[in-house]
Image (cartoon, grey):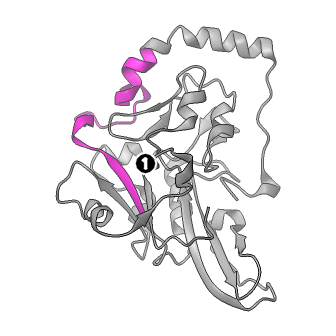
Amino acid sequence: MARHDKDSARPLIPISRREFLNRSSSALAGSMVIALILPEGSSAGIAGADYDWDRHRWVYLIDTTKCIGCGSCVRACRAENSVPEDMYRTWVERYEIPAEGEAFIDSPDGAEHGFDPVATGLSVRKGFFVPKLCNHCDATPCIQVCPVGASFATRDGVVLVDPEHCIGCGYCVQACPYGSRFINPTTHTADKCTLCYHRITTGRKTACVEICPVGARRLGDRKNPDDEVIEILATQRVEVLQPELLTRPQAFYLGLDMEVR
């Protein structure tokens, strides 16, 4: 399970080599403008007018010991960001660890409607929920493979996509090791979690953080010396997904179990 159920996965929209090269050439003319303007987010029109990018550095914290798998975060994300049906900017996975054998993992409908009891026929030793989303990596492969500069990182550490320049080639979707990107079937451009950039740049929480009934999701700011999330990162054992990939994820986990990838 990544951004959507495998059974409902939608293929990338194919384009011919000639069409790809033509679209790439036209987009490359503006690539220098993208590099200069997009890192501040202004051209995407999603940052607050008085927002200062240099005063913030965003990180995300997930406490797997608190998550109850209710799906409120998934529903809030869809409503806030108009996420297409069968696609997910965030989702929740359920892990059930039997006394013997491999872990059972599922995420029906991205956990948008929660979970039903699982009849695995096994004696479950341990069970937990793991919310997932874009990791907003510091060394992100999706930005590296984008041929037109439509995928970019803001100065405050958020990885975004400019839909006006994205050509829908799908390279970034394939490059993301966390399965957090998809091609939007309406816009035919890459889509993903933005950390609700339109909200956090105006002083609000992300929709998923705001709705979580147990405080399992939290947004932190490295440049805020009094930020409780940053205190947790400094004093408690936190982990990231697939650290061996050296992508330097900025989504951190408390209580992450060894079975989680």
Q: Is residue 20 above or below residue 210?
A: above
Name the spot of residue 258 as percent of width and height, x first.
58, 70
Would residue 99 be found to the left or right of residue 260 on screen?
right
The crowd level at tag 1 (other Cα within 10 Å; few <14, some 14-19, many 20+) is some
Q: Residue at x 78, y 56 (%)?
A: 6
User: Please, which residue is most extreme toward the left here?
Assistant: 225
Q: Residue at x 28, y 52 (%)?
A: 221
Name the spot of residue 130 as percent of width and height, x first.
56, 68
Disc 1 is placed on an element classified as loop
Q: Between 235 and 127, which is closer to the camera in this rendering? A: 235
Q: Residue at x 65, y 53 (%)?
A: 3
Q: Which residue is mark 1?
A: 196
Name the spot of residue 116 as percent of width and height, x first.
70, 80
Name the spot of residue 241 as percent of width and height, x first.
54, 57
Asked if residue 29 is among those painted magenta in the image, a careful observer would answer: no
Q: Is residue 247 above or below residue 97?
A: above
Quadrant showing the C terminus: bottom right
Q: Between 73 and 67, which is closer to the camera in this rendering? A: 67
Splitting the image into 4 quarters, where does residue 37 fall?
top left
Quadrant showing the N terminus: bottom right
Asked if residue 60 is among those painted magenta in the image, a careful observer would answer: yes
Splitting the image into 4 quarters, where does residue 14 fall?
top right
Tell me if residue 219 can be seen. Answer: yes
Tell me if residue 184 can be seen. Answer: no
Q: Residue at x 26, y 43 (%)?
A: 56
User: Please, which residue is most extreme toward the bottom here?
Assistant: 123
Q: Is residue 226 above or below residue 175?
A: below
Please, what is the three-letter code of the amino acid marked with disc 1? Cys
- Which region of the structure is painted magenta? 33-61
